[in-house]
Amino acid sequence: MTTMLNIIERRFAAVKDELQAKVPRGPDLHGHAAVLLALTDEPDPQVILTLRSQQLSSHSGEVSLPGGRWDETDPSLEFTALRETHEEIGLPADQVRVLGPLWTRNTRWQVAVTPWLGVVSPDAALTPNPGELDAIFRVPLSYFFDDPRIRTDRITIDQRRIYLPAYEYEGYEIWGFTAGVLTEFLVRVLDAPIGRRDDVPVRALS
């Protein structure tokens, strides 16, 4: 039986080499960060997301993918993604089957973030770092295919206007950069029918 994960792996293999060639490299990757788009190994994969602590000085209370900024001791951005994931949710690197990098995206704060696509066991024990996270939760990828957005946000990055869907799942609001990574993955790898919609309110972000 062909599962969604089989389809993801087959389609991602067609673009993996091209994406791998574009990954930022070098001895100095200041201004770069990496996150992990972790999918559970089951017929309807779930993506693992986190809720950042309300006590943090930046992005407090926001939904994020596990990850963070490159450290000068990190040999690569893949290492950064796995290290930060372990620190944030307690998932060891050897429990992640990394498929490869996705498209690097710039944030509004001029940080270049490279997401890494990985597969993990649905039974993986995850524990939120109390100093960084308030919660860890999972969302089935199939949830996004009906485009159940609650609004469309408009942001400007590098003088380009970008429209991003925002979602709400079991009380968690998924928006901004995290929604952008998910949407790009769903559209470019799985041909998900997610596009700009003008029939919903647009919230301009500051």
Image (tube, helix red, strand yellow):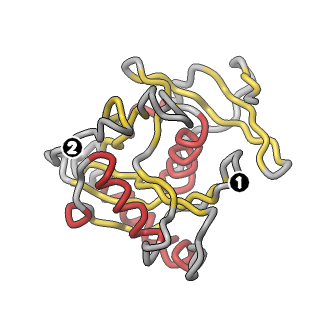
- Image coords of residue 195 (percent x, y): 65, 38
- Image coords of residue 4 (percent x, y): 33, 50
Residue 101 circle label: none
Mark 1 crowdedness (10 Å alpha carbons): few <14, some 14-19, many ≥20:
few
Residue type for callout 1: Gln
Residue at 43% x, 78% y: name it: 75
Residue at 21% x, 66% y: name it: 94
Residue at the limit of the structure toward the right, as seen here? 159
| Quadrant, the N terminus | bottom left
Residue at 81% x, 52% y: name it: 158
Given residues 181 and 82, the one toward you in this image is 82
Given residues 141 and 48, the one toward you in this image is 48
Residue 183, quarter of the rendered image: top right
The image shows a total of numbered marks equal to 2
Residue 110 circle label: 1
Residue type for callout 2: Leu
Report the Cα–Cα distance between label 2 and label 1: 30 Å
Q: Is residue 70 above or below residue 204?
A: below
Asked if residue 6 lies left or right of residue 11, the reply is left
Q: Which mark is first along the chain, 1 or 2?
A: 1
Residue 166, quarter of the rendered image: top right
Secondary structure, mark 2, is loop
Asked if residue 125 lies left or right of residue 114, the reply is left
| Quadrant, the C terminus | top right
Secondary structure, mark 1, is loop
- Name the residue carrying label 2: 126
